[in-house]
Image (cartoon, grey):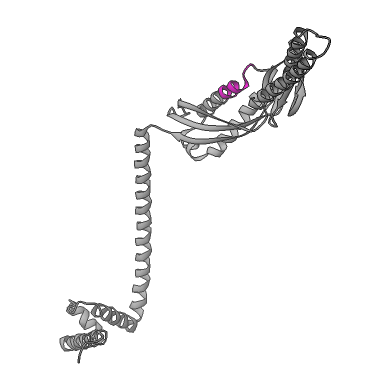
Amino acid sequence: MKNQSFFSVLIFFVIVAIGAAWTYLLSIGPAGVGLIWPVACTLFVAIVVSSAIKVADQWNKAVILRLGRFQSLKGPGLFFIIPIIDNIPYWIDIRVIATAFTAEKTLTKDTVPVNVDAVLFWKVIDAKKAALDVADYRNAINWASQTALRDVIGKTMLSEMLEGRDRISEQLQKIIDERTEPWGINVISVEVKDVLIPSALEDAMSMQAQAERERQARVILGDSEKQVAEKFSDAARSYADNPTALHLRAMNMLYEGLKSNSTIVIVPSTAIESMQLGGLAGMTALTLGLEKERNKKAKDGEPGKPE
């Protein structure tokens, strides 16, 4: 409470200054009054007034006890108390406060040790209860949060904890709010930051996930081969009923093969006969024609070359 201390000290020195001026005027007067009682009165008034004036910040509530019994809540702003009779044991912060808490090496429902970090957002809504019903409400909230977190971890499977952090946060908020409501504290939210598992178990889970992905890849590949085989079977039935379509397909396949950079294509003689290419001469003519066409395209594609 730096502002309050500064204000009290300022009031004290102002009153002392006024008393000093008054004492000086009395000392130079014709009556020759003694200076002891004016100085004593000035110091007494300065101490009493500076002790009675208090200033509370916008976010603070002052708990006033009068002769040991609760009197009232004061603040924010300027207020007065009765010195010696009134006492301010607590200044309650009514802003939203964030408290971090952890649970180390806590066993889950499937007996896996985990370390969990979380953050609690809470606010004092009844300063009287927070001051009178619990000795230290900050430590009480911290311990209540840790025990609630351990209870939730012990009732949750590891897989559920890794996948359902939102659900765990909601459970923690409900449990902690029920415990802190009698203290005049409202839990706004709970956020689970991180869940740490042993490194050996993490490696095992990584291997398991990799094996699962490989299994899915093999299943997808098998389904693809099955679908391709079914399409080939349908195509074979279509070509069996239509020899012309088979001949055109074979010609197209051969043409696409000869269009590549390679100039040698090995084709079984039975395939040549089935495609009716006219034997070796027809095959050679087709190859030479494609070669000339490729050379012509390559020549046209070289700019600036003298002819």
Q: Nearer the viewer, residue 57 or 50?
A: 50
Residue 6 visible in image: yes
Mark yes or no: residue 69 visible: no
Residue lying furthest right in this view? 31
Q: Which residues are magenta?
A: 135-144
**Residue 127 rendering spot, x and y as whole percentages:** 71, 24
Q: Quadrant of the N terminus?
A: top right
Residue 203 image position (x, y, % from top left): 34, 38
Q: Residue furthest left?
A: 280
- Whether 171 is among the magenta residues is no
Residue at 37% in and 46% down? 212
Residue 285 as seen in the image, left or right of residue 235:
left
Furthest residue to the bottom?
Answer: 307
Q: Position of residue 295 (x, y in %)?
A: 21, 86
Report which quarter residue 13 is drawn in.
top right
Which sits in the foreground, 144 or 74? 74
> Tag count in the figure?
0
**SS assignment for the magenta stretch, majority:** helix
Tell me if 25 is positioned left or right of 162 in this view.
Answer: right
Residue drawn at (19%, 87%) of the image: 288
- Residue reaching furthest to the front: 30
Residue lying at 38% horizontally and 39% vertically, measured from the top left: 205
